Image: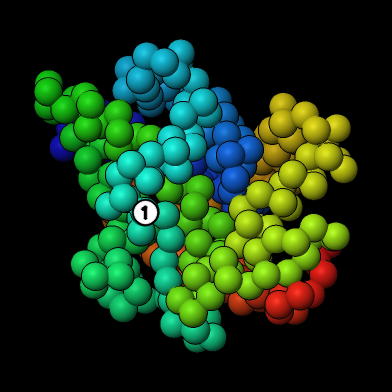
Amino acid sequence: MGMFNCVLLRSVLIVMTFVLPTAQCWGKEGHSATCKIAQSLLNKAAADAVQKLLPDYAAGDLASVCSWADEIKFKYRWSRPLHYIDTPDLKCNYEYSRDCHNMQGEYGMCVSGAINNYTAQLATYGTSSDAKYNLTQALLFLSHFMGDIHQPLHVGFTGDEGGNTIILHWYGRKENLHHVWDNMIIETALKEFYDNDPALMIQGLQTNITGSWSNDVPAWKKCNTNEFACPNPYAVESINLACNWAYKNATADTVLN
């Protein structure tokens, strides 16, 4: 892999990690905010590459296609397990070799495996003249899955399907726990703190990244290996957050707010 590809890919992945530790709710608004901020922070080489890889209908806006992976998962059913990791009930830990597989036991079919796979595909950028469609797809998948792995209940317990079978109430509204963390938290925050304006929320996150959270940014960049992507630490962080926050006191029929 050429030096250009190394720098480019590392730039994209580092920028994605700038945004993700700041929130743990990833419906359409969460994914859109992640990609909007990430694209704004790219260096010129990475920004140019993203522009070339985006489909024409995106009109240069990564955020507009950041939920594409959700929109096609029923058409491409093979991709559905790539959005999450099922871990053993109540163990509150994650191991790639134990947990990264689909229901048929196919190894690597989970969100951390997907991040590794699509990162490797994007690392070929500039070395192949006929891979544009695949690399476009790889960019859209990677952008989405980097969001998913940071939502704690995308690395949840097998028995409750990451909180999907825990039925409770968000304020007075009946929901499942997973949906609360995917959508309801961010929708409530938008209403209460940002006047239902996603642009204001994005501006607030950008301000925090360069301001009150700036001392944390170097830690977000670090990988424990020499590889470009290190999804395993993200998965460990998410299952810890799931146990300490998402699952805590969130039993059936409880009221959360």
Against 223, residue 203 (above or below) is above
Q: Residue at x 53, y 75 (%)?
A: 160
Can residue 206 be seen here? The reply is yes
- Give percent across and percent down for residue 35: 53, 34
Q: Is residue 138 left or right of residue 132?
A: right
Q: Residue at x 42, y 22 (%)?
A: 47
- Give percent across and percent down for residue 92: 52, 81
The quarter of the image holding the N terminus is top left
The quarter of the image holding the C terminus is bottom right
Q: Quadrant of residue 175?
A: bottom right
- Give percent across and percent down for residue 105: 23, 72
Against 37, residue 166 (above or below) is below
Q: Is residue 154 left or right of residue 196?
A: left
Q: Is residue 200 left or right of residue 147?
A: right
Can residue 218 be seen here? The reply is no
- Give percent across and percent down for residue 129: 12, 21
Against 142, residue 48 (above or below) is above
Question: What colouring method underlies this structural image?
Answer: rainbow
Against 87, residue 8 (above or below) is above
Q: Is residue 17 left or right of residue 26?
A: left
Badge 1 local density, few (<14 within 10 Å), some, or many (20+)?
A: some
Q: Residue at x 83, y 40 (%)?
A: 191
Residue ID for mark 1: 80
Q: Residue at x 33, y 41 (%)?
A: 75
Front one among 73 and 186: 73
Q: Across the whole image, how many numbered discs are drawn on residues? A: 1
Front one among 108 and 15: 108
Front one among 174 and 150: 174
Q: Secondary structure at mark 1?
A: helix
Tell me the amino acid under the disc marked 1.
Answer: Arg
